[in-house]
Image (tube, rainbow, N blue to C red):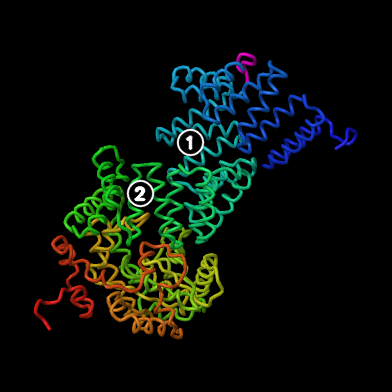
Amino acid sequence: MNQTSSPSKDESIKAALAAMKVNRPLRAEEICRDYLHLNPGCVHHLRLLGHTLMKQNRLAEAEEQLHLALEIRPGFPHLHEDIGSVLAMQQRYEEAIPYFEKAIQLEPALPLAHKKLGQALVAVGRGEDADESFKEYLEQNPVKGEIAIGLEHMKADRSDEAIEVFQKLLKENPDNVDAMRHLAIVFWKDQKNLANAEALLRRATNLAPDYVVAWLNLGAVLLDKHQAVSAVDCYQEATRLDPENPAAWGGLGGALAQAAYTEKSVQAYAKSVSLNPKAAGVQMGYAHVLKTAGDQAGALKAYRAAIVAKPHFGEVYWSMANLKIFRFEEEEVSAMFEQLESGKLSESAEYHIRFALGKAYEDKKDYESAWKYYHSGNELKRTEVFHDPVFEEEHNATIAKVFSKEFLDQNSGSGFEANDPILIVGLPRSGSTLIEQILASHSQVEGTSELPILSRIAESVGRYRADDVGFPLAAADLRKKDWRAYGQQYMEETRRHRLTEKPFFTDKLPNNFSYVGFLHMILPNAKVINARRHPLDSCLGTYKQLWGTGQHFSYDMFDLAEYYKNYDGLMKHWHEVMPGKILDVHYEETVLNLDTQVRRILDFCGLPFEESCVRYYETDRAVRTASSEQVRQPIYTGALGKWRQYEKHLDVWKEELADIVDGLPEVVRSAGELPVPGAA
């Protein structure tokens, strides 16, 4: 660049600032260096160059440029503040404090220097001095002071007071994006008004498109609203704005995982942990998707990294146990005991560790100790969840009453004609993942995951009725075109979860058994497979499982028995009113006679036999359920009759479910029995 064609100082600074605003710090650096090549003593460009280097996390280089500028102009208060900032970013707080103090001495009203000084003083343990600095900062910034008051209410769980503060601020300052974001967070944390939280964050990101934290918050809210694909867009914007932000990459990994983009999720998580390997929660999320992708070794490495970062992270111990075919090292079992005995665990951490210890002792065949920890873990978990077995029973009874044979016959032929879906329903831990894996090994079938779409559509029926009548009663008033529209809606929403053009796909959400009648009305050609297992094995498997969300019935033995009876009764109703619609597949029969059951399943779905379905364990695909590792192994009989090892503790289930057990095929009832000594 020659002297005559070079931009003026103001033009150069304007161009560099514009590049910084669109998150192009490297381009801003080039602009500053071009100008400094001809004007090496320009303090403003040296300072701005320091900012571009800080943005790129090249902190030592930034410090060097800022010191050079300060030598040229030692009385420039902003340079003292900048050097303090770059030192604080390197956690050199003792060195940073004098620079912040000097900046304030030169310019007492410097906007953020008091706040930065307070933060540095807190870091070195000078709390009282820090209070004075924060007080001065807030007095100079009354709006910031009000936000700080709102934040204090948030920290103390005084939601109503926090809402009042932030709403007052927005009334006086309608475009204050900080107040918008914090108000949205209050709504989000209370889970009372996610729609308002989303609206506030969308407005904040519209007003301030480069507000990275608001994009992160918006992504989190959308995930809670089960809008994973939209959340991905938010996190991608955050990573574009701040490519070195580990939280943005971690959030993107989580959103991609929920949207079923497993490989992309692995890549995003890997980027996040490379930027910050000490983020325990991100390491755990990374491990989850590695497990889903079938990389058990990588998952264990990430789980163990999470524990190193956070030794009392009970959820990680349980996640390791949840690999099923994994066994804890003795030192890991000892570490869990140490955490339990410390008396410092949260309830959540404690029950996670108790479930993990149950698995550890089961692997040692010490079933008494295993039951002790499984049972105590369930008792602790039950105190924090709500389940109403009476409501559950009444709700299912109403569903059966509405979807009677007469009602189904009257409205037959009303739905959408697509025959793509194959739904797998039942109770958790009853072999549904094995059936899914068998089907997903067929060349014409795509295995998706547990899709919460059918239940969401069903429960939306009647939502806006003035008389507040909802599903299932509201379904009685639907018109024929409504049934078809709901079928189209289901197909459109599931399309986002399909990655191939295969003609059929599985939807494996066990709890969908309640909605089989609704499914038949909206998609009459959909296939339904009911995954069944000996009730005591099914209940035991469910009781030993600590669920991420939902399944609140599973933490109490009586509740679990009642839920099983409701399930069994409703499935019998569906068989009666829709003969031939549902195929029952018993886990025990599948394990003991795989080839026959595979042919039976494929024939029911109208699919030609393929040997790959018998060799399902060779299929390379993401599996997102607790059985992900087990279905990557050849068929085994070790899980048959598992309930017999805990029989002395299962009297409640044996009594409540006796009639159901008596009606099972003999091969199911006798599965897992020890051979009689001396028998031929």
Foreground residue, 62 or 510?
A: 62
What residue is disc 1 on?
163
Position of the C terminus, as image quadrant, is bottom left
- Residue at 67% in and 35% down: 52
Q: What residue type is labelled 2?
A: Glu
Depicted 645 relative to depicted 121: above or below: below
Q: In this view, does 77 lie to the left or right of 414?
A: right
- Residue 33 image point, x, y percent: 75, 34
Crowding at dot 2, Cα within 10 Å, few <14 / some 14-19 / many 20+, comes out as many
Q: In this view, does 156 lie to the left or right of 659?
A: right
Q: Does the magenta stretch include residue 407?
A: no
Crowding at dot 1, Cα within 10 Å, few <14 / some 14-19 / many 20+, comes out as many
Q: Distance between the residues labelled 2 and 1?
A: 32 Å
Position of the N terminus, as image quadrant, is top right
Q: What residue type is labelled 1?
A: Ile
Q: What element carries label 1?
A: helix
Q: Does the magenta stretch include residue 105?
A: yes
Q: Which mark is residue 103?
A: none
What residue is disc 2 on?
315
- Residue 128 image point, x, y percent: 44, 17
Which residue lies most toward the top here? Answer: 105
Q: Earlier in the sequence, mark 2 or mark 1?
A: 1
Q: Is residue 227 visible?
A: no
